[in-house]
Image (tube, grey):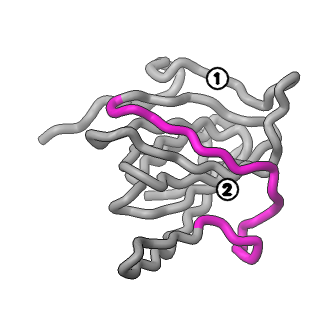
Amino acid sequence: MKLIDGVKLKKLKVIPDERGRLMEILRCDDEFYQKFGQVYATSVLPGVVKGWHYHKKQIDHFCCAFGMIKVALYDSRKDSPTFGEVNEFFIGIHNPLLIKVPPFVFHGFKSIGTEEALVINIPTEPYDYKKPDEFRVKPHSKDIPYDWSRTDG
């Protein structure tokens, strides 16, 4: 799959022992790290879609710490070499991955397991309650060429 311009992936290192496990997510010495805004966790219930949205300033760095999610990205930037591209990833407990999402790239995710999934995000900007840098489109909008339904077969 051709990655959308500016999207970066990092395979996460999981270190297990008899007490449990540790997973490094984002480090200040990662090649794509820029700055820290805040860290937050959000959950998504089985079958629920959270998306679509994009940011004008903020870069997101997110992973699924518990459960499994399907992540979809759509490049709506007309001046991008990957304009119109869609990327799809399956991340979580079985595939620990950090995804860097640049500004103006629509993104969303859907819990694909039987349990609530927990997503950790480390954006470059703190959330501005008075003027949020968040622009939304309904999850099943025909403006984005992506179908959130499961593919059986």
Q: Position of residue 66 (x, y in %)?
A: 42, 52
SS under mark 2:
loop
- Residue most extreme to the front: 19
Badge 1: how crowded within 10 Å, few (<14), some, or many (20+)? few
Query: Which quarter of the rendering shows the N terminus?
Result: bottom left
Q: Which residues are magenta?
A: 25-47
Asked whether residue 43 is drawn in magenta, I would say yes
Mark sitting on residue 136: 1
Q: Which residue is mark 2?
A: 6
Secondary structure of the magenta portion, mostly?
A: loop
Closer to the camera, 126 or 87? 126
Identify the residue at horizontal 53%, vertical 21% (top origin). Answer: 143
* Spot occupied by residue 75 in the image (x, y as percentages of width and height): 60, 40
Tell me the kind of residue under disc 1. Answer: Arg
Label 1, label 2: how far apart the Cα atoms are: 20 Å
Quick check: 69 left or right of 143? left
